[in-house]
Image (tube, rainbow, N blue to C red):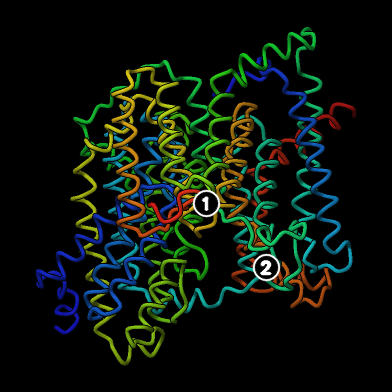
Amino acid sequence: MDILSNFAMSWMDPWLLSLTALGTLAGIYVGAIPGLSVTMATSILISFTFKWPVNEALALIAGVFVGGVYGGSRTAILLNIPGAPSAIATALEGYPMAKRGEAGEAIGLTTVMSVMGGFIGILALALFAPVISDFAILFQSRDYLLLGLIGILLVGTLSGESFAKGVFSGALGVLIGMVGLDPMTAEGRFTFGSIDLMGGIPYVAAMIGFFGVAEALVQLHQLDLKAVKQKIDRIIPRFRDIKRYFWLAIRTSGIGTIIGALPGTGGDIAALLAYDHAKRSTKNPEVPFGKGAKEGLVAPETANNAAVGGAFIPMLTLGIPGDAVTAVIIGALFIHGLKPGPLMLVETPHLFWFTVGNLTLANIFLLIFGLTGIKVFTKIVECPKAILIPLIIVLSAVGTYAIQNNPVHIYWMLLFGVVGYFMKVYGFQVGPVILGVILGPMMDTNYRRTMIAARGDLGSFLWNLVSHPITLVLTLSLILMILSQTPLKRWVMDYLAKRKEVR
Amino acid sequence: MSNAPSERPAELVFAVIISVFSVVAFWQAYEISGFSSSHSAGVFPMLAAGTMVLSSFIILCKTATSSVPSHRTIEELRLFFRQVLPFRQFAILVLMAAYLFSMPWLGFIVSSGLFLLISFSYLWGKGILATLSVTAASLASIYFIFRVVFQVVLPQGEWFRGLF
């Protein structure tokens, strides 16, 4: 009975109910603006709530988190500029749909699937929180290294016309991620003695440059094309579509929940892994991937919203943040006098079910706000490109500046925009660059931790990669992925065939 | 925009540029800590830069063997400025650079206003009144969202300090 009353607390209290609604609405629109990340929105909004009672603060935060993660998909679909890194994969399939005039359908499907993913994440939080957190704590640095390597192999999926070009883009991203002071030894890497470079290059600047400015420059080629009239009569997705993608959505929600629950990995990695899963597991998509396949839209969106519930699991049960947003939330809980972690469930058990109830409520609001207001949003695409392009450039500049109030980041963004434009023109995909920027630093730190644990001995390092059940499973998956994602298998087959012929 | 591989002017030049960049990046990565240990700060940068060198050389070889050699340099340059960097792109790039580099002096509001005004009138080609009103409306909404709602301190500029 206690559980139920705590769960329904924000459903019954009109003030808490409206705060959750307000948070969700704000989250959607903030998340849609490139440069204004969910993390930033949460940290700013949380600063308003320091003097509020804790329940009200949590109600607003849950709404912002859920809405913000979803919001990134809107600009990804309409403008090919992901509002947040977790919407990068969404842009790959959503934007081609918008180019065909199907933005309404894409947003509708995204909304329903996001809500579905969100519910699965919350269900996992409610049912398996203790089990999943026990599992997640078993992950060691070598497992994170393997997870990062599996993630980086997605370049195979994202590379477009040439595998070599995809690999180059991914490695360039890793290199960009390495700039700055080394987090372990504080040695400068590619800093050339400049103080501005010591802090590193924020990946949002790279993301906005490669996606925002580069896309704006590419769009200039089609300035005289009439804007595509968007069909918005079909916003609520067809039942046939939901039925068709149901099992895929369940699987990708599972991926999202688990990745979200791992400390340090959030919706962005979850979405990319889910996209890759969809691409590999879908044999006959209605529309090919990269041209607006709905599977490629469903997978990342279910995964990144399921990762929200997942990220709360280690936060509430262990006090370890699942991603950047939950790290901010943990800070807020401390300010409110709470101790997130195993003790919190003992001392303030009502907060667990209150949070579960809040997230559920926020998901319901997401469905309502997500399916309404699309008309206004699609007007953005119908706006003449001559107005839209300069606006994108200004928004990119202010969005990049807003991250750390550092004008130098704007110059980085401009440089990445120009480089990204030429890369796009010469057939390079920019998705792998961002993948590298996000995964590079994570792989670097975990590789070195694993190597240090092996005392620098390559033999022990390799033994570590197969000596534990979880690690073994990950190593085997990595080998399988290398075989299936790279042209290695084809080269080996060709070589064997040639040898046979010679004989 | 993605042209068919054979239609991309100066693709070979781009492949050479990225190869040179990769080699320089590898040299810089080596400078971090050389091959001193298997877990030094330079290992991963070297791995990344090494991958770039390898892949850029593959791209270079592929481009060199598949590119159409019929064009003369002048013709190639003409095609480059027609297909890859036409005047419109070039003009917006220059405008963008001027906008971003003038921001520390003019401040966000003035430089963005000027950038929007000039690029709208160049790209949109409507009357001055329409251009002015669209500029004002866009600027006002950006200012409201970022400055008022999110309290982002926008760059004020040396010349107009304290004005916005």
Q: Is residue A70 left or right of residue B24?
A: left
As displayed, is residue A478 above or below residue A167? below
Query: Which of the chains bears the disc numbered 1?
Result: B
Label 2 is placed on what type of residue? Thr
As displayed, is residue A113 above or below residue A260? above
Q: Which residue is mark 2?
A: A445
Q: Secondary structure at mark 2?
A: helix
Q: Is residue A428 left or right of residue B22?
A: left
Q: Residue at x 60, y 57 (%)?
A: A439
**Disc 2 or disc 1, which is closer to the eye?**
1
Does residue A315 appear in this view?
Answer: yes
Label 1 is placed on what type of residue? Glu
Does residue A476 appear in this view?
Answer: no
Q: Quadrant of residue A15?
A: bottom left
As displayed, is residue B53 above or below residue A86? above
Q: Which residue is mark 1?
A: B158
Q: Residue B9, how many percent across, how many down?
A: 69, 17
As displayed, is residue A167 above or below residue A497? below
Q: Quadrant of residue A444?
A: bottom right
